Image: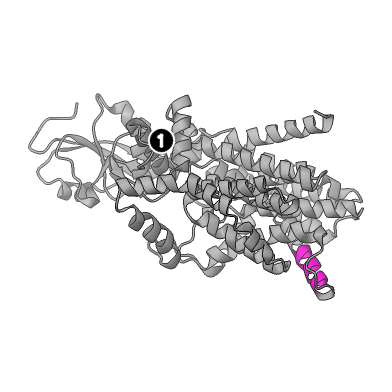
Amino acid sequence: MTNRTRTDSLLLAGFCAFLFFYGLGQFGLIGADEPRYAQVAREMLERHDWITPVLGGHPWLEKPPLYYWQAMVAYSIFGVSDWAARLPSAVDATFLVLAIYFFLRRFRPGCEIDGGLIAASCAGIIGYAHAASMDMALAAAFTVGMLSWWTWRETGKRIYLAAFYGFMALGTLAKGPIAPFLAIVVIVSYAAVVRELRLVLKTLWLPGIFLFCVIALPWYFAVQARNPEFFREFIVEHNLGRFSKNLYHHTEPFWYYLPVTTLALLPWTVFAGDAFARSVRAWASQKSTSTSGADPEYRLGIFAGCWLLVPVAFFSISQSKLPGYILPPIPAGALLLADYLKLRSERNDLDPVPMWLAILHALFAAAPIVPALLIAYLVMQHRLPGGKPMMVAVAIAFVLCAGIALTLVRKTGLRMLRFVTLIPVVLTVGAVLKLGSAALDQTLSARPLAQEIADIEAHPLPLAVYHVPRELEYGLTFYRNHLTFNYEWGKVPQEEHLLVAPENSQVEIAKALAGRRVSYLGHFAARHVDYYWVAAAGASSMPR
């Protein structure tokens, strides 16, 4: 191992450890999806069932099993916890970064550490590396698959084409047929742009298709055999239905993914955009003067540009939009920027960065430190504060912005791009975890409420909810490891139980529980809910 390889390894290991693994359990599972997916994995593990996803003892057929399998392994080794539920995503993110590093070491030697660190520090990658969800598993499998396809295209070695099909199969197990579909559209788009349409036919390799089927299809056949409703629920409703109709109320405007992609690529958005624009100009110039397709020097950039653009365009026409859908193309932004830096280096094009570009990049890189330092105010009060806290945060951001801009406009500024950009990334992530964990836990997770209820129980009781957000319902289900009854669905337990409801809703509760004794137990201010003891139907005893 050379000194440079050793240094690269230490840098990647250190940044992945901090950006992906540090603080996985500092705040509880948030939203509806994290606790729901974590609980499905737990119930599958308890049932020793690796085929049918189960929630509350009933089949939950919305998603494929790859994340559940990963979480089950994590639970088996480390025990069931919120950080163990997030561990698969952190591991997948690390795998994604390493894939980009080794790919660039082969095809763009000298910029591999830039590409790896750029990918690791993208806001979208960091965020979903801390989420118990399928998005990072899909992004990692899709990334390795696309890099394998390009390696086959460059070397002609079928082992890489086999790897492409294998990782597309894993992507299909991560989130469904969207993985091979997007891969096909990206490859066709690239082949059309560089006028190499024969690539599409050459990619359709029967042994590879067979390998894909061997890896991806057994679970689909097995789950369909056990659950005849699977095809309707998963394929028709949660794939075709989500795209063509707003079945789950995730409607957003057509341009929604433009700001989402901009944020997901932070702090590299500006340079990634400049790299994309340069690739387009280079391709246009080549096209106007040549009939043989794009110059080989620019082909990787064009491929990365297609990979970045196609999913954004595709999901923009979907009727259902969620931020995580856009994660698979984010690594392409890192690849595009690394290729751009390498080409400039090879041409000795290391002139000072234009002032406008330096300032714009500095603003995008430094700005996130402001909400990071004030995150407690944002999540608790839903606004940025005025006065001294705001002045301090803005002053820190200004110093960072000025330092980055002044560094980049120097003659060697481009060589310092990675270093000066990673400083605000580390400070932002550290600030969120250090200053915001408690507020995030209190306001967005059910963990503190579940613990508070457990502390007053003389013995475990069933739990019900009434008119509370579904993220709180699913969170309580995970942290209590018991099905949470919901009054709104007519599920009012006849036995003695606890009830969580919005604050000051005693009148509605009395109507829903006419004739039953109800005792107020406490108030959880951060979530604006009260909790009660409810006697068994026909009983008059006080809570024990």
- Name the element at disc 1: helix
Counting every numbered tag in the picture gives 1
- The three-letter amino acid code for the residue at tag 1 is Arg
Identity of the residue furthest to the left in this view: 538
Residue visible at 44% across and 29% down in the picture: 75
**Which scheme is used to colour this image of the protein?**
one colour
Residue to which mark 1 is pinned:
447
Q: Position of residue 364 (x, y in %)?
A: 70, 54
Residue placed farthest to the front in the image? 206
* Quarter holding residue 54: top left
Q: Going 81% across and 52% down the picture, which residue do you hit?
A: 341
Image position, residue 539 (x, y; %): 9, 34
Residue 292 lies, in percent from the top left, at 80, 69
Q: Dot 1 surroundings within 10 Å: few (below 14), some, or many (20 or more)?
A: many
Q: Residue at horizontal 40%, vertical 37%? A: 41
Depth check: 372 or 43 in front? 43
Q: Is residue 331 left or right of residue 320?
A: right
Q: Main secondary structure of the magenta part?
A: helix
Q: Is residue 427 magenta?
A: no
Q: Is residue 481 above or below residue 424?
A: above
Q: Bounds of the magenta span? A: 277-287
From the viewer's side, name the closer residue of 233 and 485: 233
Against 402, residue 198 (above or below) is below
- Asked whether residue 28 is in view, the answer is no
Q: Position of residue 56 (x, y in %)?
A: 29, 40
Which residue lies at the image location 84% right of the left edge and 50% below the top edge?
A: 414
Q: Quadrant of the N terminus?
A: top right
